[in-house]
Image (tube, rainbow, N blue to C red):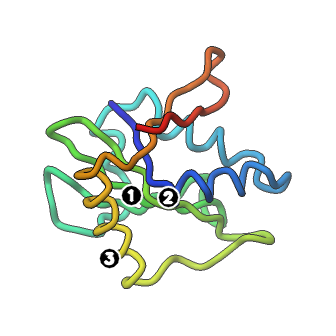
Amino acid sequence: MNIYCLEDFKVEFEKLKSKKSYNSFEQEIISYFFGKTKEELCSGTRLNLSEDAPYIKKRLKGRGGFRCYFLLILKGENLYLMYAHPKTGSMGASNIDDKSKAYLYKKVLTCIKSNDLYQLELNDTSKSIKFIKL
């Protein structure tokens, strides 16, 4: 499974990672998205009806944890992280509205076509994520 992200996700990831109260965020991303089958990644709230390219909102770290929005392209086995946010704490927010969800969906499709993405890989110890601009 190839994992990519929008710049929006990378920016939010770096903000959250820099805050002590959200220090578990990176490990939550690693444990949920890396080394999983496409069937395991299909859990969460589906935001569209597509079988080949489900748009999913996933809770990480349970209630009050983080929300992650992603597109999973099953035919090519690519996953595109679009946005994430905490539910609680100084940067906490409620779920994004339908207009924002639609905006992210259109943006990820545009970024896939233009190859304006980052690829996520684990470092040598598999304990942190590195972003590689395509």
Quadrant location of the N terminus?
top left
List the residue tagged with mark 3.
102
Q: Are marks 1 and 3 in contact (CB under 8 Å)?
A: no
Residue 93: image tag: none
Helix, strand or loop status at disc 1: loop
Give me the C-alpha separation between circle 1 and circle 3. 17 Å
Looking at the image, which residue sits at the far top? 124
Type of the residue with mark 3: Ala
Estimate how packed mark 2 is, as few (under 14), some (14 to 19) or many (20 or more) residues with alpha carbons within 10 Å: some
Picture quarter containing residue 87?
Answer: bottom right
List the residue tagged with mark 2.
68
- In this image, 20 relative to 80: left or right? right
Quadrant location of the C terminus?
top left
Q: Nearer the viewer, mark 1 or mark 2?
A: 2
Residue 44: image tag: 1
Estimate how packed mark 1 is, as few (under 14), some (14 to 19) or many (20 or more) residues with alpha carbons within 10 Å: some
Q: Residue at x 27, y 60 (%)?
A: 110
Type of the residue with mark 2: Cys
